[in-house]
Image (tube, rainbow, N blue to C red):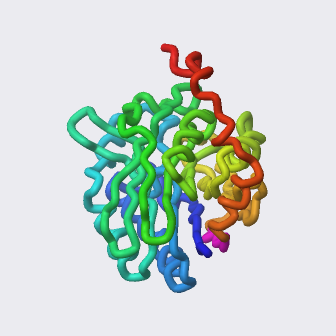
C-alpha cells in the first residue's frame, strides 16, 4: 500500500511585487506548510507542481526569468531533501534547471526517502504556441524516460505538455514505472477536456498509477487564464480515485495498492500483445 500526495498551489507574489529571488522565496515558503502536513500525515511519495517555485512565466518572453534557473541537484533540491529525510518521504521536485549558460531545462528531481538525490527527468516535448512560448525558455529533454527505484515504488515523471504524447507514456511503462507523476501548468480553455481524458488513458493503456497536478489561480501580468487545479490520482484501470478542486491550494492524498498493477496486467495483456516490429512509422523523422 502506498500513500501519495500532490500539492496544487496558487502564486503568493508575482512580477512587479518583488524581485525574482523574492518571488521564488515566497512561493517556496507557501509550499512548506503543506509539505510538512504531508509528512505528518504519513505521505510516502509527494509530488509538487511544474516548476513549483516560480510563476508560469512562459506566456511572456522575458529573458530575466533565465535568472530563476539553477543547478539540479542544487540549492532548492538540497532544501527539499531535508524534508524528504525528516519525514522519510520520497519527493518529486520540479524546477527550472540551468546546466550551463544557454542550457536550460524544465526538470523534475527525484529525491528518495532518506534525502538521497536519485536523478532527474527533463521535459521532452516543448510547446511553442500562443501563450506557451516554452522554446524561448527550455531546451528539449535529453535524458530519455528514466524510472527511479525509490524506497516505496518505481517512479517515472512526465511533465505537462508531455501528456499529449502516448509514446513516452508507453516507454515509462516498459521501463518499469509503477507510478507516473505529471506536474503541469494548464489553463481553462481548449485543452481542459483533455485533462481527464489523456492521463486516465495512459494509466489504462500501460497498467500503472498516475498522479496528475495542475496549479490554481490567475497569474499577472501574463493573464494567460485561470489555472484550474483539479489535480487527481488515477489507477491502472483508468479510474480517477481522488481529485482536488478547481480553485484552492490543496494537498491531495490518496492510498492505493500496487498489487493492482499485476491484477490489471494479468487481465489486459497489452505489453504481451504489442507488435513493436510493426511500429517503424513511429520513429521516422
Magenta stretch bounds: 250-256
SS assignment for the magenta stretch, majority: strand
Q: Is residue 225 left or right of residue 142?
A: right
Q: Does 92 appear above or below 203?
A: below
The residue most toward the bottom is: 40
Q: In this view of the protein, which residue sits in the foreground, 4 or 40?
A: 4
Question: Which one is nearer the viewer's eye here, 246 or 221?
Answer: 246
Q: Residue at 42% of width from left, 61% of height from top?
A: 149
Is-magenta flag for residue 184? no
Which residue shows up at 26% across the image and 61% down it? 75
Q: Nearer the viewer, residue 55 or 285?
A: 285
**Up-down relation of residue 242 to residue 96 (above or below):** below
Give residue 251's quadrant in the image. bottom right
Residue 226 in view (yes/no) = no
Q: Is 166 above or below relative to 39?
A: above
Place of residue 42 in the rendered image (x, y in percent of width and height, measured from the top left) = 54, 82
Residue 212: x, y in percent? 62, 54
Residue 228 position in % (x across, y down): 69, 52
Q: Image point 63% across, 54% down: which residue?
A: 208
Instruction: Name the quadrant of the N terminus.
Output: bottom right
Residue extending farthest to the left is 101
The quarter holding residue 282 reads top right
Near-viewer residue (111 or 126): 111
Say left or right for 194 vs 218: right
Please provide percent x and percent y for residue 65: 36, 42
Above or below — where is 111 with respect to 120?
below
Picture residue at 71% right of the left edge, 59% below the top: 235
Amino acid at each position: 500500500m502506498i500513500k501519495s500526495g500532490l500539492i496544487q498551489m496558487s502564486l503568493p507574489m508575482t512580477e512587479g511585487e518583488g524581485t525574482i529571488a523574492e518571488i521564488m522565496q515566497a512561493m517556496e515558503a507557501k509550499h512548506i506548510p503543506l509539505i510538512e502536513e504531508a509528512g505528518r500525515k504519513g505521505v510516502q511519495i509527494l509530488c509538487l507542481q511544474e516548476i513549483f517555485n516560480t510563476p508560469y512565466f512562459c506566456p511572456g518572453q522575458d529573458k530575466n526569468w533565465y535568472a530563476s534557473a539553477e543547478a539540479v541537484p542544487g540549492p532548492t533540491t538540497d532544501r527539499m531533501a531535508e524534508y524528504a529525510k525528516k519525514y522519510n518521504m520520497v519527493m518529486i521536485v520540479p524546477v527550472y534547471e540551468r546546466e550551463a549558460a544557454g542550457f536550460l531545462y524544465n526538470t523534475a528531481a527525484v529525491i528518495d526517502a532518506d534525502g538521497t538525490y536519485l536523478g532527474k527527468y527533463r521535459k521532452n516535448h516543448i510547446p511553442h504556441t500562443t501563450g506557451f512560448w516554452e522554446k524561448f525558455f527550455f531546451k528539449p529533454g535529453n535524458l530519455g524516460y528514466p524510472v527511479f527505484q525509490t524506497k516505496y515504488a518505481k517512479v517515472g515523471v512526465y511533465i505537462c505538455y508531455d501528456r499529449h504524447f502516448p509514446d513516452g507514456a508507453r516507454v515509462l511503462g516498459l521501463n518499469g514505472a509503477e507510478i507516473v507523476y505529471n506536474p503541469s501548468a494548464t489553463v481553462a480553455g481548449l485543452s481542459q477536456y483533455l485533462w481527464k481524458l489523456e492521463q486516465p488513458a495512459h494509466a489504462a493503456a500501460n497498467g500503472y498509477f498516475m498522479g496528475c497536478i495542475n496549479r490554481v489561480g490567475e497569474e499577472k501580468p501574463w493573464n494567460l487564464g485561470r489555472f484550474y487545479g483539479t489535480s487527481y490520482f488515477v489507477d491502472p484501470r483508468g479510474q480517477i480515485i481522488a481529485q482536488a478542486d478547481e480553485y484552492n491550494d490543496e494537498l491531495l492524498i490518496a492510498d492505493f495498492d500496487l498489487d493492482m498493477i499485476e491484477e490489471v496486467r494479468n487481465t489486459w495483456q497489452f505489453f504481451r500483445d504489442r507488435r513493436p516490429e510493426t511500429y517503424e512509422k513511429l520513429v521516422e523523422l
